[in-house]
């Protein structure tokens, strides 16, 4: 680790004032501690860099949205002092942008219309059966004609990653037969339109990174950097998630929750953490994050050893 005084850190950060980050929850339930961890890490990373932190509601998969969940999520963020910059955006209000991106990919000859039933594919890598259907057809899913070759990228941890998307997922769906745009397409279009250049999120989404970088490159968008935060496991070893019925974060004890999250992120917490204002606690957390998690230096050891819940 480079020895650096606080002035150096501020100078190093000054070059990142164009930083734009985001937190993008799906309104399929309340925020559990694992999602709050991703929210806090992305917030701290943006603020430590003097950047903007946006919040986007990833509600494109409308059948999975739960009434009232968006409101609960936003109130939970606010209760913990995590106020977002700029206007809130929702995927459900951006269908025209996704359609335009699809049209661009179609023009490049990268799409085809697939009539295969889910049952006939049995979850296997798509065999390329409908690849010759390169123009609009009714009652079809729209798939990407996945280009061959490795997608390579480097994460902020310094770790080099590579994925041959053609072999791992094949020709993936960008718009479902029921008319719903895929999460992969929406995220890529949204991030580009909002100028997101730093993505900090849970490790469970790492598997989507190859596809998202591939789509970003095919659409000619600027690329963001990625920092994946370890997910929190329950005592039974499963990732905390809505599917495993992880409880929503209690908004009555924000200092306690923030302190727990700071410890999970490997940050030192002040002994009087429970008696500070939320603003003061977050200010300390931002300073701490600056010390341990600036570009390429994040070592989340605490979280990997965490056993709770
Ligand atoms: Zn097909």
Image: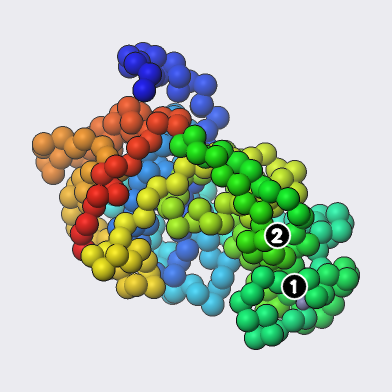
Q: x, y (%) of residue 14?
A: 48, 20
Quarter holding ligand 1? bottom right
Residue in the picture at 35% in, 63% down: 239
Q: Which residue is mark 1?
A: 127
For this view, does 233 lie left or right of residue 274?
A: right
Residue in the picture at 86% in, 58% down: 109
Q: x, y (%) of residue 181?
A: 66, 67
> What SS does tag 1 mark?
loop
Q: Say which label, 1 or 2, has the lower sequence index.
A: 1
For this view, does 137 lie left or right of residue 242?
A: right
Q: x, y (%) of residue 271?
A: 11, 36
300 or 191, which lies in front? 300
Residue in the picture at 78% in, 71% down: 128
Q: Which residue is mark 2?
A: 166
Above-or-below relation of 74 to 225: below
The quadrant the N terminus occupies is top left
Q: x, y (%) of residue 139?
A: 77, 82
Above-or-below relation of 61 to 251: below
Disc 2 Cβ-to-ligand 1 distance below 8 Å? no
> What SS does tag 2 mark?
helix
The quadrant the C terminus occupies is bottom left
For this view, does 143 lie left or right of residue 303?
A: right
Regarding residue 258, the answer to whether it shows in the image is no
- Crowdedness of circle 2 by 10 Å Cα count: few (<14), some, many (20+)? some
């Amino acid at each position: 680790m480079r020895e650096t005084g606080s002035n150096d850190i501020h100078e190093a950060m000054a070059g990142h004032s164009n930083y734009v980050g985001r937190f993008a929850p799906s309104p399929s339930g309340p925020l559990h501690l694992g999602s709050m961890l991703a929210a806090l890490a992305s917030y701290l990373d943006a603020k430590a860099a003097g950047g903007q932190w946006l919040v986007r509601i990833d509600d494109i998969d409308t059948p999975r949205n739960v009434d009232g969940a968006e409101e609960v999520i936003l109130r939970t963020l606010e209760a913990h002092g995590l106020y977002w910059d700029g206007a809130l955006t929702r995927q459900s209000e951006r269908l025209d942008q996704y359609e335009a991106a699809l049209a661009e990919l179609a023009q490049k000859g990268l799409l085809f219309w697939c009539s295969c039933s889910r049952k006939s594919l049995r979850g296997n890598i798509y065999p390329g059966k409908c690849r010759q259907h390169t123009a609009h057809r009714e009652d079809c899913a729209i798939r990407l004609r996945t280009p061959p070759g490795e997608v390579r990228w480097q994460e902020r941890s310094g770790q080099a990653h590579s994925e041959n998307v053609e072999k791992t997922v094949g020709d993936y769906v960008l718009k479902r037969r029921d008319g719903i745009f895929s999460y992969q397409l929406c995220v890529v279009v949204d991030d580009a339109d909002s100028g997101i250049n730093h993505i900090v999120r849970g490790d469970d989404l790492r598997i989507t990174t190859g596809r998202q970088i591939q789509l970003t490159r095919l659409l000619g968008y600027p690329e963001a950097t990625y920092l994946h935060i370890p997910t929190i496991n329950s005592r039974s070893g499963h990732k905390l998630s809505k599917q495993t019925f992880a409880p929503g974060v209690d908004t009555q004890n924000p200092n306690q929750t923030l302190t727990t999250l700071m410890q999970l992120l490997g940050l030192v917490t002040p002994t009087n953490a429970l008696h500070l204002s939320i603003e003061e606690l977050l200010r300390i957390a931002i300073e701490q994050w600056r010390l341990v998690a600036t570009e390429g230096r994040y070592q989340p050891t605490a979280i990997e050893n965490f056993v709770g819940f």
